[in-house]
Amino acid sequence: MSSAQLTFLGATGTVTGSRYLVEMRGKKILIDCGLFQGPKENRQRNWEPFPVPPDEIDLVFLTHAHIDHIGYTPRFCRENFNGRIYCTDATNELSKILLRDSAHLQEEDAYWANKKGFSKHKPALPLFTVEDAEKALQYFSPLHYGEDLYLSGDFRIKFKDAGHILGSAMVDIKIINRQESRKIVFSGDLGQPGNPILRDPIQVYNVDYLIIESTYGDRLHEKVSTSDELARIIQESVKRGGVLLIPSFAVERTQVVLHTIRELEEKWLIPSLPVFVDSPMAIEATEVFDKRLVDQNLATRISHLEGKQIFYPQKLKFCRSREESKAINNIKKEAIIISSSGMATGGRVLHHLALRLPDPNNTIAFVGYQAVGTRGHHLVDGKPEVKIHGRQIPVNAWVENVPGFSGHADYHAILAWLMAFNRPPEKTFIVHGEPEASASLAEKIRSHFNWEVDIPELGDVREIEM
């Protein structure tokens, strides 16, 4: 065995900015390269120099395509990274969509800030541009689940299905010795079992060091069916005579919501309403989901064999252009709008919120985790107004929260997954959670399994033996 180092460069004490550095066998390997989101102090970290000069990093491995895991790659590559960025095939396809869209939003936000004068920077600049995103994508190299990548004869890395979003993966790093193999596993974001589209997270074994997320480390998803909850919300929205707005992550969440609406229509549990998907990124992601049956669960593939278009409610309309987006403003009742971003941190959903929030007949339904400091958290927390594009908008609409749609495993699911480990890891590192969630999961793991647990802070370095 030889000494190796883990450095925690992000997603410690928060659920965003996923970045972990592994130094071993003369290699510097970055696991995830995400953006910090949420509170201002978090977002400002995106503008700081990367803690390790990017040209010193040999390889990057991405667990999945959410922006808090891939969103810094354009800036990272612009700062002279010249290695390869490995991910699964589906993550590669989705990253093309998300990074281009994220860069477009960066440029658009800078444009609005300059036009409306609500930035202290003169001029306001984007963190990265569409050109930066295009250049970064040239470094991406897709791998299949389970495909071995050997960095040397005894140094192997592979991806395993994490069940969180399409293409999401754990990163399994193994040193193969004749006497004893050693393994590090980064869980990425673990999916909640029973996802209507994706497979459950795969089981792993013989793990010496585990780095595990804790987004829902202190919470359980409600036992109430998310399908029943959405049916209730839609029915009540119709009775009130308003419009239902669903801020939704473009990838996985939008597709699950569309799948659920279509099933509710098929069962005659809701009326068939016009459903507007107002997010070019979500539209493109839906098209990726349509063609990547290989990454979906058995039940979903059977539905395809039966000829069902599982992501297409009867009156679905994709809104790609700004003109189509603006036209939705004329709809005053009995309609559903699905728009990004899911935490209302940016994107077209902000314009819809600004228009719909003041009207008590309207409903805003959040369908996933809302990080502290985001507009979504602000609204779910019951605040009477919210700031959008420099203006305070009164909150008169009904605000609903359906956390069961979250793609994250709750603590029961995490503990159940850990229960099947064939032996305890030498150490388990808790990351990617708010402080209370991480502390709660750590205590649960100690009490249930008596494992050695560590909750690192930003910048912490840990010596491990590989």
Image (tube, helix red, strand yellow):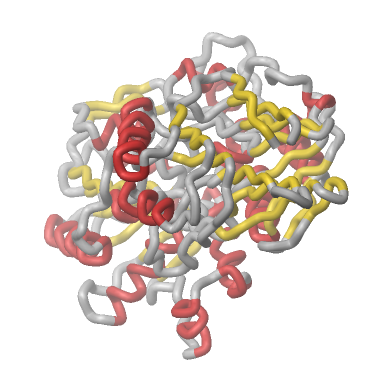
Point out the image quarter for the N terminus: top right
| Total residue callouts | 0
Q: Quick one: 182 or 75, which is closer to the camera?
A: 182
* In the image, residue 26 above or below residue 40: below
* In the image, residue 239 above or below residue 408: below
* In the image, residue 189 above or below residue 416: above
Q: Quick one: 163 or 97, which is closer to the camera?
A: 163
- Residue 374 left/right relative to 81: left
The structure residue drawn at horizontal position 58% and vertical position 43%, both measured from the top left corner, is 208
Q: Tell me if residue 329 can be seen.
A: no
Q: Tell me if residue 460 can be seen.
A: yes
The structure residue drawn at horizontal position 55% and vertical position 22%, both measured from the top left corner, is 115
Residue 390, how many percent across, how many down?
A: 41, 21
Residue 109, how many percent across, how many down?
A: 56, 29
- Residue 402 left/right relative to 165: left
The structure residue drawn at horizontal position 50% and vertical position 20%, both measured from the top left corner, is 457
Q: Quick one: 221 or 460, which is closer to the camera?
A: 460
Residue 155, how many percent across, how many down?
A: 79, 46
Tell me which corner region of the image, top left, top right, bottom left or bottom right, holds residue 312. Answer: bottom left
Q: Quick one: 165 or 397, which is closer to the camera?
A: 165
Point out the image quarter for the C terminus: top right
The structure residue drawn at horizontal position 44% and vertical position 32%, both measured from the top left corner, is 453
Instruction: Please identify the residue farthest to the bottom as the structure is shown.
Output: 306
Instruction: Please identify the residue farthest to the front as the structure is shown.
Output: 179
Residue 257, how many percent across, how many down?
A: 38, 62
